[in-house]
Amino acid sequence: MKYLIAILIFVYSAACFGQNSHLFRTIYYPAEPFGGEKELKTFIKQEFVYPDSALQNGLEGEAFITFKVNSKGHVIYKEVAKNVPLILQKEASRIFDKIVWEQDPSRSDPDLGFEKLRIDFKIKKYQKLIKKRGYEHLPNIDNPYVLESNYYNINQVDIKPEFNAATNFNKFLKENFNYPNIALQQGISGRVTVEFIIEPYGLASNIRIKEAVGGGCNEETARLVRLMKWSPALKNNKAVRCLYEYQLNFVNPGGSVR
């Protein structure tokens, strides 16, 4: 264990509003979550559900998950430390299983090191979190503790996800789209391609910019994706996680998108 700790370095320890999580990364060939560490923190805040019985009994703690992810983006080792009550271990494990990891053929599997994720269970911070995000339990989910972590691509589902809004998609963009000031000032135009998971509860997670455009266009695309509400994909009459790709054009006055 001492050796394991020695090969880990701490590179991400920023306090976040309402919910803390920290990623400890290996020195060599660190695994990359979709969207990077910032998106990982955002995803944990969205997905985090404090177990009801743990809240009622005032259970708190820091859950540690030690893991390895191979070059194909598959988790090949996972161990949840037993330093917190089992019910908190299970919730930390559930969240971890829903993280999507990048494929990276340049990583050498024999040289992969252990990495570690810490998820904090603090009741007061959780209460702040649910006030900010607007829900305590995952929306439209009867039992958030048994959701599957597997996801499907758009061609593997029986019914594809649909944008769910009282108005049409173009009106949604008209009401919410903001052309980034830097892109305007620098005359930047382009097409951002973003990839993300549509969760069974209708929100996007694991947001990854696949084809980027500078000047703040990537950030604006991700912001809009977070605002979108979806009717989830269905497989065998069951709501499932679905990998979805979306493109957003940024056309500066006088510019064009090829």
Image (spheres, helix red, strand yellow):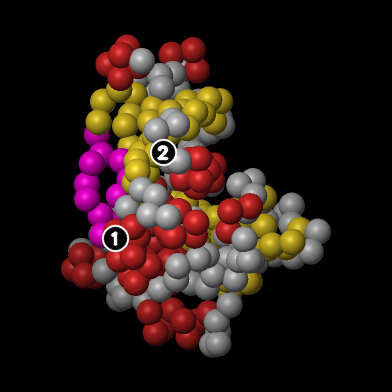
Write the residue at 44% across / 60% down.
Answer: 56
Percent of width and height locating residue 165: 55, 82
Percent of width and height locating residue 226: 43, 66
Mark 1 burial class by Cα count in 10 Å: few <14, some 14-19, many 20+: few
Residue 255 visible in the shown view = no
Quadrant into which the C terminus falls: bottom left
Q: Is residue 129 left or right of residue 69?
A: left
Q: Which residues are magenta?
A: 11-22
Write the residue at 48% across / 72% down.
Answer: 228
Write the residue at 61% across / 47% down.
Answer: 149
Q: Give the residue type that dot 2 points to.
A: Val
Which residue is labeled 2 in the image? Answer: 84
Q: Main secondary structure of the magenta part?
A: loop
Residue 185 visible in the shown view = yes
Q: Secondary structure at mark 1?
A: helix
Which quadrant would residue 34 be assigned to in this image? top left
Mark 2 burial class by Cα count in 10 Å: few <14, some 14-19, many 20+: some
Outermost residue on the right side: it is: 236
Which residue is labeled 1 in the image? Answer: 124
Which quadrant would residue 158 be assigned to in this image? bottom right
Q: Is residue 239 above or below residue 104?
A: below
Percent of width and height locating residue 162: 63, 71
| Residue 76, disc | none
Tell which circle, 2 or 1, labels the residue nearer the N-terminal end: 2
Q: Secondary structure at mark 2?
A: loop
Q: Give the residue type that dot 1 points to.
A: Lys
Q: Is residue 13 magenta?
A: yes
Q: Is residue 12 left or right of residue 200?
A: left
> Total label count?
2
Write the residue at 44% across / 71% down.
Answer: 135
